[in-house]
């Protein structure tokens, strides 16, 4: 594979040389998450300037179970020395109780960079290298959502505000191109094959209000079905948690159900529909929409899933107040405060994404694991592609 | 092979992807913002691709004024994608409608295998993201492809190499997208 019009080795050589030229004899702080982007960016810088790279894993408190330890071990196996800095108290004290998606992302970004500013000062680093890739700044500049790592493109002067300049060697690349470079650099498979995980982590998968109990439930169910989620034929598969949605109906919903009955070929009154309390993000006609999500239930959920592509093709025209549709795949149980949505997508560049088929057996195994947490009352499978939905929920 | 491609992007999220695809095909390409000034400035390019964007267009939109300059004052082949197509339609006194929004997968049916669809099947899947569709085109255009639901997916000017597609050939979920871009660039 070529990167744009260059061979990979030429492209990498040029990146390494340009990093060396820009940095001169300064120290560089690297914030690494264990994801492929930040790892490749830090590793390229390490190739360019060696030990003057000071790599840190920031524990934000929104990581998955055991993530910090596993990541540290992987990076050290690559030869990249890395330290852990625990900032979870600072993140929790500003974020617990917050509801608005954009506000959550902005506060996260603020604290994240304040933490880095402190570390840069401690390490006498004039630069911060980060793994920003093209979709990050395209979505932020296009106001689809505020990515936590996009500053320069928004006109934020990091030198004045945080005391470091930014180094973003991957800013023109897409995920599949970064993956090709990582393969060329012999980055460990666990890092290359690791699914993308957003910088703000479980914060943005705790949709709506951030509560400690909700976050813990999400972390627990994520750990419970991590291996099963990997069995879905997807580029990314994860769980998000919501407040238990309310049963609802309206004129457009009954029109929508009528269309579904035509598509699926089932009649009768067996449908139930639920409206989620939290708004979720989407992208329609190149602009961001922040709108509602609808859950549908019928005991023949298998049939709904089988016809999901026809349903999502039809829904934007009929169901104008909603941006996402998810199929309820668990049998409702009365106890429990939260609903969980299984989100799986297929994509290589993360700019557009389709939703894969999942066998009902695998889905039932996942549901069974999730329902082990008694705080959960419903489990959905999100059937909305990107567009109109985004991959994450906020 | 040394064709030079100018991409005019009305701030759509896929505009940078057009740049990527065209470079991957081995052509020289540059991305500019779509406005009247840049339309007059792009010299030394063989073809122009207009990308998508978030604006909702009418006859007085700056995007449409820029496209008028491009198609009436200059002679390069033009391919409009999504908003680019809508702007071409309005520049030639066509009409838009909000009746057929479509996001994500769609099937298209090729009615006429003009150059841009050369070597492609008659029916294939594409990826879309539009609130507005082109509901009317004047006689100097012919329709090349339609959606399953019947609305216009692709058209061309009958005399000049001016093309429009409503779907996004630059995204990975559109089948044969790079081939369509390739066909268009090579026709110049």
Image (spheres, coloured by chain):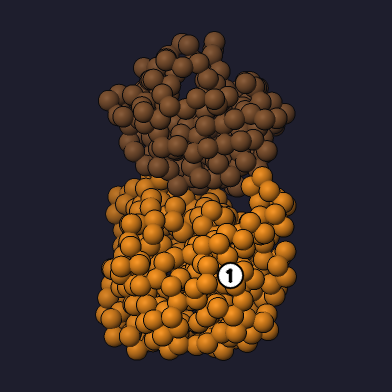
Q: Chain of mark 1?
A: A
Q: Is residue A107 left or right of residue A349?
A: left
In percent of width and height, residue A280 lies at 36, 62
- Residue situated in front as seen by the camera: B71 or B90: B71
Q: Secondary structure at mark 1?
A: helix
Label total for image: 1
Q: Quadrant of the C terminus of chain A?
A: bottom left
Query: Which quadrant of the figure has residue A107?
Result: bottom left
Residue ID at (55%, 41%): B19
A382 on left or right of A282? right
Give the x, y percent position of residue A272: 40, 63
Which quadrant of the structure image shows residue B136?
A: top left
Tell me if residue A155 comes above or below residue B164 in the rendering: below
A59 vs A308, nearest the viewer: A59
Q: Residue at x 62, y 41 (%)?
A: B23
- Chain shaded orange: A
Which residue is painted at 52% across and 72% down in the image?
A25
Residue situated furthest front in the rendering: A25
User: Which colour represents chain B?
Assistant: brown
Depth order, front residue of B156/A118: A118
- Residue B108 coordinates in the image, percent (x, y): 58, 34
Whether residue B60 is visible: yes
Residue at the disc numbered 1: A45
Is residue A363 visible from the viewing direction of this image?
no
Task: Write the residue at 44% across / 31% down.
Answer: B84
Task: Measuring from the top left, give residue A284's x and y in whole percent.
Answer: 40, 47
Q: Residues within 10 Å of mark 1 (few under 14, many from 20)?
A: many
């Amino acid at each position: 594979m070529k990167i744009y019009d260059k061979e990979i080795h030429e492209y990498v050589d040029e990146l390494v040389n340009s990093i060396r030229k820009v940095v001169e004899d300064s120290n560089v702080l690297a914030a690494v998450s264990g994801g492929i982007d930040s790892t490749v960016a830090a590793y390229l810088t390490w190739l360019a300037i060696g030990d003057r790279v000071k790599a840190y894993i920031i524990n934000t408190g929104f990581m998955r179970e055991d993530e910090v330890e596993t990541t540290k071990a992987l990076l050290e196996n690559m030869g990249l020395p890395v330290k852990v800095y625990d900032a979870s108290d600072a993140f929790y004290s500003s974020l617990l109780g917050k509801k608005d998606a954009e506000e959550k992302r902005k506060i996260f970004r603020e604290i994240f960079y304040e933490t880095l500013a402190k570390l840069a000062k401690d390490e006498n680093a004039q630069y911060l290298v980060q793994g920003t890739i093209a979709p990050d700044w395209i979505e932020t500049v296009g106001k689809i959502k505020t990515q936590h790592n996009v500053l320069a493109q928004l006109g934020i002067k990091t030198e004045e505000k945080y005391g470091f300049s930014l180094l973003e060697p991957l800013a023109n690349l897409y995920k599949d191109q970064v993956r090709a470079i990582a393969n060329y650099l012999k980055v460990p498979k666990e890092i290359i094959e690791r699914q993308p995980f957003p910088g703000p982590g479980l914060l943005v998968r705790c949709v709506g209000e951030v509560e400690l109990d909700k976050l813990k439930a999400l972390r627990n169910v994520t750990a419970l079905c991590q291996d099963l989620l990997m069995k879905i034929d997807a580029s990314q598969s994860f769980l998000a948690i919501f407040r238990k949605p309310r049963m609802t109906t309206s004129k457009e919903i009954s029109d929508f159900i009528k269309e579904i009955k035509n598509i699926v070929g089932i009649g009768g009154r067996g449908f139930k529909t639920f409206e989620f309390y939290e708004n979720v993000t989407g992208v329609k006609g190149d602009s961001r929409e922040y709108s509602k999500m609808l859950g549908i239930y019928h005991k023949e959920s298998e049939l709904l899933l089988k016809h999901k592509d026809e349903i999502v093709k039809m829904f934007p025209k009929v169901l104008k107040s909603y941006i996402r549709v998810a199929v309820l795949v668990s049998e409702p149980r009365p106890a429990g405060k939260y609903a969980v949505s299984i989100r799986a997508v297929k994509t290589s560049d993360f700019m557009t994404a389709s939703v894969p088929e999942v066998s009902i057996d695998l889905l039932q195994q996942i549901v069974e694991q999730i329902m082990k947490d008694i705080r959960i009352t419903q489990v959905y499978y999100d059937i909305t592609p990107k567009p109109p939905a985004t991959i994450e929920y906020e | 092979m040394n064709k030079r491609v100018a991409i005019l992007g009305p701030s759509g999220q896929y505009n940078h992807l057009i740049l990527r695809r065209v470079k991957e095909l081995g052509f020289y390409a540059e991305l500019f913002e779509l406005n009247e000034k840049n339309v007059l400035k792009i010299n030394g390019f063989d073809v122009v691709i207009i990308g998508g964007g978030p604006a909702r267009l009418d006859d007085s939109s700056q995007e449409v004024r820029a496209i008028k300059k491009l198609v009436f004052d200059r002679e390069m082949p033009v391919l409009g994608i999504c908003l680019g197509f809508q702007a071409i339609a309005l520049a030639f006194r066509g009409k838009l409608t909000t009746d057929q929004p479509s996001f994500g997968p769609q099937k298209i049916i090729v009615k006429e295998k003009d150059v841009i669809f050369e070597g492609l099947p008659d029916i294939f899947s594409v990826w879309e993201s539009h609130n507005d569709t082109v509901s009317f085109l004047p006689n100097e255009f012919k329709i090349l492809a339609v959606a399953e639901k019947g609305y216009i997916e692709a058209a061309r000017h009958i005399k000049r190499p001016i093309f429009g597609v409503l779907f996004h050939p630059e995204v990975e979920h559109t089948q044969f997208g790079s081939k369509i871009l390739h066909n268009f660039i090579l026709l110049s």
